[in-house]
Image: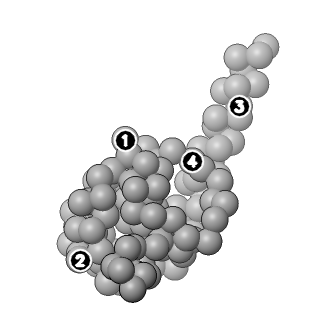
Amino acid sequence: MPYKEKIIEKQYYSIGEVGQMFDVTPGLLRYYEQEFELLRPRKTQGGTRRYSVRDLEIFKLIFHLVKERGYTLEGAREMLKHNAEQQRERFEIIRKLERVKKFLLEVKERL
């Protein structure tokens, strides 16, 4: 299921909020933390996870590679390790193109 575009408004998000944004369970987020070294949200003294905007961007990229592009976890790890910046740029281009497509479809419906 594609990521639901949401404007990032806060400095930190709870695991539940991130799960709702991506329509995934908190368990999947915890699992991805174990599988991907790049994804390391801060934890409060009580152990509550706090995802920063950077953490959200990293998770978006992982989510895109695994859920939307069909990479295995190992394949996504390798892709991130060797081509992290290039993948972020590609991901941003894809997101922008999707927004343009959505806009054009809305314009078409109004005609």
Question: For mark 4, what is the residue?
Answer: 5
Q: Are marks 4 and 1 in contact (CB under 8 Å)?
A: no
Identify which residue, 1 or 29, lies in the foreground.
Answer: 29
Secondary structure of residue under mark 1:
loop
Q: Residues within 10 Å of mark 3 (few under 14, many from 20)?
A: few
Q: Is residue 80 visible?
A: no
Q: CA distance from mark 4 to mark 3?
A: 17 Å
Q: CA distance from mark 4 to mark 2?
A: 25 Å
**16 w.r.t. 109: above or below:** below
Where is mark 2, residue-wise? 34
The answer to which of marks 4 and 3 sits earlier in the sequence is 4
Q: What's under tag 4, amino acid-wise?
A: Glu
Q: Secondary structure at mark 3?
A: helix
Check the image and report above or below for 35 versus 94: below
Residue bearing mark 1: 1
Residue drawn at (57%, 47%), measured in percent from left and top?
5
Q: Measure how far apart labels 3 and 1 are at the Cα level.
A: 22 Å
How far separated are the C-alphas under marks 3 and 2? Answer: 40 Å
Position of residue 109 measured from the top left corner of the image (x, y, whole percent):
70, 17
Residue depicted at x 77% and y 16%: 110
